[in-house]
Image: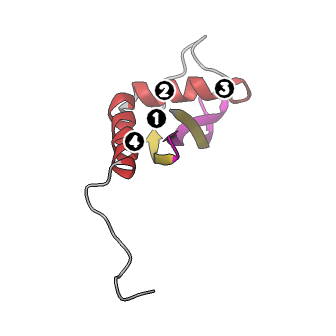
Amino acid sequence: MNWKIDFLKCLPSVGGVSNYVVECGWRVSASLNGHASGEYGVCAFTPPAIVEGEFVDYTKLTESQVLGWCWDGGVNKAEIEARVLAKIDELAHPTILIPPLPWVA
C-alpha cells in the first residue's frame, strides 16, 4: 500500500504558533498483477491547547507523522486497505462482465 498526504490546511496562528495543521487530505493506492485501485479522504484535527514540547513546527513535519495523526484520528487504515485490496481482487476476478455487443464488429 502506498499512503500519501496530498495537502495540509492550517490556521494562521494558534497560541502564538504559525501554520497550525487542522486538516489534511490523504490517499492510498495499491496495484497487483496489473490491476490498481485506491481511495482518498480528508481528516480533520481539533487544535488542542499548545503544550510545551508537544507542538511540531510546520517546517519539521513529516508525511509519516501526519499519516499517524490520521490513523490515530479515525482513519481506519486496516479497513481502508482491505477495501482497496477487495477492489483489486474484483478487477482481477470480475463477478460481472461487460462483453462487446455481438452486433458490433
Q: Which of marks 1 and 2 is nearer the N terminus?
A: 1
Three-letter amino acid code of the residue under disc 2 = Trp
The answer for how far apart the CA atoms under marks 4 and 3 are is 27 Å
Question: Which residue in the protein does label 4 denote?
Answer: 84
Could you say which is closer to the camera, residue 87 or residue 58? 87
Horizontal relation, residue 76 to residue 60: left or right: left
Q: Mark 3 points at which residue?
A: 61
Q: Is the magenta stretch mostly helix, strand or loop?
A: strand
Q: What residue type is labelled 3?
A: Leu
Mark 3 vs 2: CB contact within 8 A: no
Of the two numbered discs 4 and 3 on the same chain, state the one appearing first in sequence.
Answer: 3
Residue 46, located in which quarter of the rendered image? top left
For discs 1 and 4, the disc positioned in front in the rendered view? 4
Cβ atoms under marks 1 and 3 closer than 8 Å: no
Q: Residue 23 carries which label?
A: none
* Residue wearing tag 2: 69
- Residue 25 part of the magenta segment: yes
Q: In which quarter of the image is residue 95?
A: bottom left
* Residue at the image point whose x is 39% and y is 34% from the top: 81
Q: Does the magenta stretch include residue 16?
A: yes
Give the alpha-carbon distance from disc 1 to disc 4, as whole Å.
24 Å
* Rendered location of residue 16, percent (x, y): 65, 29
In this rendered view, identify the residue nearer to me: 88 or 102: 102
Label ID, residue 45: 1
Query: Quadrant where the C terminus lies?
Result: bottom left
Mark 4 vs 3: CB contact within 8 A: no
* Residue count near mark 4 (Cα–Cα under 10 Å), binned few <14, some 14–19, many ≥20: many
- Secondary structure under the numbered disc 3 in the rendered image: loop
Provide residue 39's location: percent of width, then percent of height.
44, 47
Which region is colored magenta? 7-34
Sequence-earlier tag: 1 or 3: 1
